[in-house]
Image: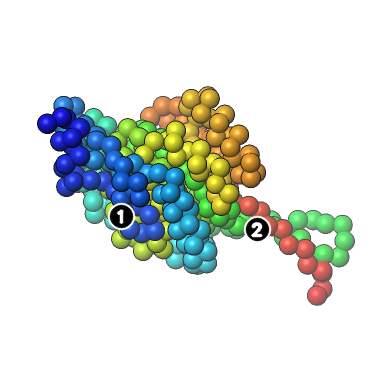
Amino acid sequence: MAKDQDARLDVRKMYKLFINGAFVRSESGRSDALWDGKSFGANIARASRKDVRDAVVAAHAAQTKWWKLTPALRGLMLYRLAEMMEARRAEFIERLREGTRLDDDAARRELDAAIDRVVWYAGWCDKYGALLSTRNPVAGPHFNASSPEPMGVVGLLAPDEPSLLGLISVLLPALVAGNSVVMVASERDPRTAVVFAEALAVSDLPAGAVNILTGYRSELGPILAKHMDVEAIGFCAGDGAFTTELRRDAAENLKRTHVWSQSTRDAWFDDSSQSLDMIAAYCEIKTIWHPAGV
């Protein structure tokens, strides 16, 4: 029996898409075999255009639910996400060791950094609004105040490595800002992203607030960039032609584009990979005029 045929028959090791709070196969039925060296690792569901559309519909429906929660409650849900990641510690370490060939110490270091980053961003949920809001001086009898609001649905392409910390670093700023997310996982080994989705499923976030797709970045990225119900897209600097293509596609509906500049694995561990500015990148500023004394 051929190697790929043997892999397709092993349905027990199928890693599915995470859409609207549920784990589902691709509507096309496609999957790709992932091999750990010479041994079969898993079948990875390969998302299609229809899966992207389904994820965007789910994200669009969940965005208002997520944003309307009080900031303190959103923060508590993200703290719970960190707790669920800690509860799956052994599984995360195993996936990081197998998928990215890390030793135990390096896998623990990445997991610890990822959990710490979730906690760090969770603490911003009830604080960033005050820091990004302003009362603006105007020449006239009016109050003029600006405050941040979410953009809506954000499409994100996770870096290949670090597979967990990179995913966390690009996901949390958009989520903290009140957006819902459609995330394309690492191509190199998306199993870590699926384990993260399992932690998401039990962290009390509204179904559809985060949707995780596995497949090819070159196939799914342009679909997200062109989708008219996706208000922003974020991805890592890499192939120049692909970056140019995404920017051009995103310009069709004036979609905001955020490009992460981290070029090495170690750069994602640096404190510069987490900041208030990254939350602000996925906010729109709403300005209100009100007559003074009324």
The residue that disc 2 covers is: 147
Using the rendered view, name the quadrant where residue 186 is placed.
Answer: top left
Measured from the top left, where is residue 200 in percent x and y?
Answer: 34, 55
Residue 241 position in % (x across, y down): 53, 25
Which of the labelled discs sits on residue 1, or is there none? none
Residue drawn at (33%, 58%), measured in percent from left and top?
22
Q: Quadrant of the N terminus?
A: top left
Position of 218 with respect to 294 (left or right) is left
Left or right, 263 with reference to 1: right
Q: Residues within 10 Å of mark 2 (few under 14, many from 20)?
A: some
**Horizontal and vertical percent for residue 67?**
52, 62
Viewer-nearest residue: 75 or 7: 7
Which residue position holds label 1?
Answer: 23
In this rendering, which labeled residue sits more in front, label 2 or label 1? 1
- Secondary structure found at label 2: strand
User: Where is residue 158 shown, x and y percent of the image?
Assistant: 42, 39
Give how far apart the Cα atoms at labels 2 and 1 are: 36 Å
The quadrant of the rendering that contains the C terminus is bottom right
Q: Is residue 185 in view from this perspective?
A: yes
- Residue shown at 60%/57% (left/top)? 149
The three-letter code of the residue at mark 1 reads Phe
